[in-house]
Image (spheres, helix red, strand yellow):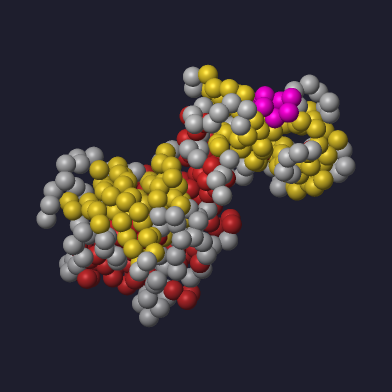
Amino acid sequence: MALLDSKDDAVRFDGVTKRFGNVVALNEVSLTIGRGEFMTLLGPSGCGKTTLLKLAAGFLGPDNGSIAIDGKCVNAVPTYKREIGMMFQNYALFPHMNVAENVAYGLKTRRVPRHECRQRVAEALALVKLTGMEDRRPRQLSGGQQQRVALARALVINPTVLLLDEPFSALDKNLRASMQVELREIQRKLGLTTIFVTHDQSEALSLSDRMAVMSEGQIRQLGTPVDVYRRPSDRFVASFVGDTNRLRGQLVGVAAAHALIALGTTHVTVPSEPLSDVRPSASVDLFVRPEHLHIVPAGKPGTMTGNVVAQVYHGGHVDLQIDTCGQDRLLVRSAGDQAMARWPLGTQVGISIDADGCAAFPLAQH
């Protein structure tokens, strides 16, 4: 088995390509995941994130490139020898087994002695707060309890890497949020390297140490949640991760690390790197988060003007939809619940832009 020079790497993909017939699911993907890191693979359906997870698990083999776990190439190593814990979207519990038997399954296949097996099952169930439910069958459990059983089964074998394939998708919103917190606490407590697949942006932003945003079989951006959200690398990442507004502007000029964008009489400064090949006066797309737009009195110099056409109350904040001349409808997010009374439907308002966190990109090529 080949050894790779990667002392601090838990998992490494080097130039991995995977094809299904004429479809290229992954195109020379390289990604390194550190020990104890929580890495999220985020992207729309068909982007390649689940294929990458299955390659790590050994359910699929790469057509090109190499995969290393704990510094060892595992291209030819079967799943059961990789010491990975896997948690599926549908939990995949055995209905004829009780909770303890489901959790112990991986230990029994590894021929762990019976007394050690009982101890490790008890420890795993305590970790996921299911002590006392050892004798229940899956049908006697709630969705959240079934998920905990699946997590305990993945953890009890003391895996080198924990692989999670959209494990929260079947849960309701409140239970999903509480399980996310519990999973992160367990992961940090154990220092367990984790690869998490999701298409839910808020889930990725809240859980990850780093996240890889994927599209069309490639990683479009790799970084911390803050980096990806505040400094998107391209227009796909800017539009896919979180809510955003796209405004058509004009490049005034570039000076070192900053570029100046004109939106009528409004000017916004953004990072210049994505616009390095754009000539001055050319049209560009400016991406602005809804929390970076602010309502001000109509007609205030340096602002845009629009009319409030819709209000959506979310409890902690209000989303205002505003029609502006020459731009797409804007989404403005206002904290608290006063926005509905202050700016009723039909009100003409001014809109200012907080440039912090804005990004501009060349127009899309068709």
Residue 71 x, y percent position in the rendering = 19, 47
Residue 340 located left or right of residue 118 = right
Nearer to us in this view, 246 or 248:
248
Residue 310 located left or right of residue 65 = right
Residue ID at (16%, 46%) = 4
Q: Quadrant of the N terminus?
A: bottom left
Above or below, comparing residue 187 to residue 265 in the picture: below
Type of secondary structure dominating the magenta stretch: strand
**Residue most extreme to the left:** 1
Q: Is residue 151 visible?
A: no
Residue ID at (43%, 42%) = 221
Above or below, comparing residue 6 to residue 46 in the picture: above
Nearer to us in this view, 216 or 346:
216
- Total marks drawn? 0
Residue 273 x, y percent position in the rendering = 48, 29
Q: Quadrant of residue 77?
A: bottom left
Above or below, comparing residue 279 to residue 13 in the picture: above
Q: Which residues are magenta?
A: 261-268
